[in-house]
Amino acid sequence: MKVFLEKSAVQARQRLPALLDEYRPDLLILIHGGNDILQQIAAEQTRDNLKAMIAEARQRNIPVVIFGVPAFGIVFLHSAKIYEELAASEGVPSDLDSLPKILANNELKSDTVHPNDRGYRLLAENVVALLQKHGAL
């Protein structure tokens, strides 16, 4: 499994087609937008970039699942609204709860916005659960 980190969804959108062609993954797990939220990029722009990434994967017959990133504030209780909207409009399986719950727990974070090893392990377990729920595993 390859993991690629970008500073924004627009950067990911620009790099994704070449990465999909090079690696030909069986699945795209899309967890993007946190840096956009931190940089106060308009939610509509982030949504459009995520939607374009879903389209790139679909053009290559690569299934997509999306994980919601919380809107950052005092407490991380819910994914930003765009993730629920995207999951519904694009018909992709989603997990809107895992990352907000992980980031709300200081024991699962390495800093204010990133999971630590335990947090990433829990996120990976939730990826597996989502795939099992939708019959992919």
Image: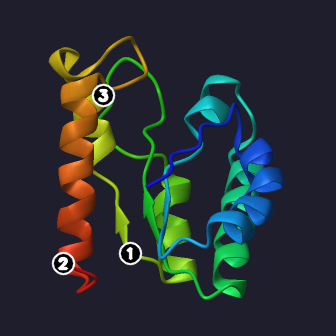
Question: Within 10 Å of the Cα at label 3, are there few (<14), some (14-19), or many (20+) other Cα atoms?
Answer: many
Of 134 and 79, nearer the camera is: 134
Tags 2 and 1 touching, CB below 8 Å: yes
Kindly identify the amino acid type of the residue bearing the numbered disc 1.
Pro
Residue 86: x percent and y percent? 55, 68
User: How far is the residue under mark 2 from the one under mark 1?
Assistant: 9 Å
Name the disc covering residue 93, or none.
1
Question: Within 10 Å of the Cα at label 1, are there few (<14), some (14-19), or many (20+) other Cα atoms?
Answer: some
Q: Is residue 43 above or below residue 77?
A: below
- Mark closer to the chain start, 3 or 2: 3
Report the coloring of the rendering.
rainbow
The quadrant holding residue 75 is top left
Q: Nearer the viewer, mark 3 or mark 2?
A: 2
- Taking the view exactly as shown, the residue that stands out farthest to the front is 22
Kindly identify the amino acid type of the residue bearing the numbered disc 2.
Lys
Q: In this figure, which residue is indicated by the disc labeled 3?
A: 103
What kind of element bears circle 1? loop
Residue 114: x percent and y percent? 40, 23
Residue 92: x percent and y percent? 46, 78
The quadrant holding residue 16 is bottom right
Left/right of residue 24 with respect to residue 68 in the rendered view: right
Q: Is residue 109 above or below residue 12?
A: above
User: How far is the residue under mark 3 from the one under mark 1?
Assistant: 21 Å
What kind of element bears circle 2? helix
Q: In this figure, which residue is indicated by the disc labeled 2?
A: 133
